[in-house]
Image: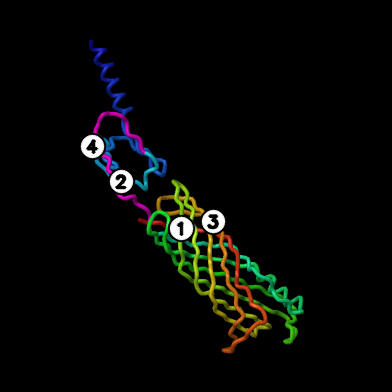
């Protein structure tokens, strides 16, 4: 009889352990206990720690999966408005390539400077606010920069120089329409923005700078995919274009007009990190 009672006690203990509810976090941790309440925002559960019952609540964004054992214990399941991250910020760095054909000047050394200038350093930052799970508005700010130098450069109608540097900066700022698709561990996002393009080019023959500036209307659009390292942080890659051109420049306070529009367009590929919050 005594052995039978011991066997029954062990069986009951095994059943109670195996019948525990299970919560799996996004970091791969597991929690065994009793789930008391489930809604779209959080899960309330109870565990026994050092012989003491503890009652805790965990936000759903930290939970990868959960399983409710059939113990017969009541679980309150409520439905509420789905929650989503309405704020997202990203910053990216990478490579850009200037688009458009360079006009021939008749000097191979001078044209070589502009050919080298097509390879650029790119950066971008986006601040997004979403109205719902898929659509929102954003502010897009991006820049393309390049600096090259050559020796023994002949500038047509100016002269021969032992060293010539060329620098340019293109800055885009504009409001954007943003869209996204979110999965458990990945997020795909895209945006299209309209706004001003600011252009600055400095030619420095033998340390005597000549600066051109311009401002025009442009467009920027891109698409990116990211891996969620945590509920708030992610890293990913983005492809995009900035489009614009102008014929009107400022030099020493005077307006200079080119025969053909000069392209300010570029293609870029970057890596980025992003932050999301409720």
Q: Which residue is mark 3?
A: 237
| Residue 63 against residue 131 in the figure, above or below | above
Question: Mark 2 = which residue?
Answer: 42
| Front: mark 1 or 2 | 1
Distance between the Cα atoms at labels 4 and 1? 45 Å
Tell me which numbered mark, 4 or 2, is placed earlier along the sequence: 2
Q: Residues within 10 Å of mark 2 (few under 14, many from 20)?
A: some
Asked whether, in this view, residue 204 is left or right of residue 125, the answer is right
In-front residue for pair 196/36: 196
Residue 53's mark?
4
Q: Considering the image in quadrants, where does the C terminus appear?
A: bottom left
Relative image position of residue 117 (x, y in whole percent): 66, 71
Distance of label 1 from label 2 (alpha carbons): 26 Å
Residue 73 relative to residue 186: left or right: left
Based on the displayed image, in which of its 4 quarters is residue 21 positioned? top left
Vertical position of residue 237 compared to residue 24: above or below:
below
Depth check, mark 3 against mark 4: the one in front is: 3
Q: In the rendered structure, which disc, 1 or 2, sits on the residue that comes first in sequence?
A: 2
Tell me if mark 4 has few (under 14), some (14-19) or many (20+) residues whose alpha carbon lies within 10 angstroms of its own: few
The boundaries of the magenta stretch are 66-85
Per the image, the residue denoted by label 1 is 179
The span from disc 3 to disc 4 (Cα, nearest Å) is 46 Å
Question: Does 189 sit left or right of 68 as displayed?
Answer: right
Q: Is residue 73 magenta?
A: yes
Q: Choose the circle earlier in sequence order: 4 or 1.
A: 4
């Amino acid at each position: 009889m005594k052995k039978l009672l011991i066997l029954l006690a062990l069986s009951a203990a095994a059943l109670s352990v195996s019948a525990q509810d299970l919560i799996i976090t996004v970091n791969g941790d597991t929690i065994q206990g009793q789930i008391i309440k489930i809604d779209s925002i959080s899960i309330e559960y109870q565990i026994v720690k050092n012989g003491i019952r503890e009652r805790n609540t965990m936000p759903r964004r930290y939970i990868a999966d959960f399983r409710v054992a059939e113990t017969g214990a009541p679980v309150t399941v409520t439905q509420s408005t789905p929650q989503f991250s309405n704020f997202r910020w990203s910053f990216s760095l990478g490579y850009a390539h200037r688009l458009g054909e360079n006009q021939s000047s008749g000097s191979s050394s001078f044209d070589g400077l502009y050919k080298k200038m097509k390879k650029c350093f790119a950066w971008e930052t986006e601040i997004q606010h979403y109205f719902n799970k898929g659509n929102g508005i954003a502010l897009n700010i991006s820049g393309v920069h390049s600096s090259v130098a050559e020796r023994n450069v002949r500038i047509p109608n100016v002269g021969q120089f032992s060293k010539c540097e060329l620098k340019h900066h293109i800055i885009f700022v504009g409001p954007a329409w943003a869209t996204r698709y979110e999965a458990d561990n990945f997020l795909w996002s895209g945006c299209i923005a309209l706004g001003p393009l600011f252009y600055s080019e400095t030619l420095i023959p033998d340390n005597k700078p000549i600066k051109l500036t311009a401002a025009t209307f442009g467009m920027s659009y891109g698409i990116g995919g990211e891996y969620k390292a945590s509920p708030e942080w992610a890293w990913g890659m983005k492809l995009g274009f900035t489009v614009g051109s102008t014929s009107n420049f400022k030099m020493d306070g005077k307006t200079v007009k080119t025969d053909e529009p000069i392209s300010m367009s570029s293609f870029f590929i970057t890596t980025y990190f992003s932050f999301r919050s409720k």
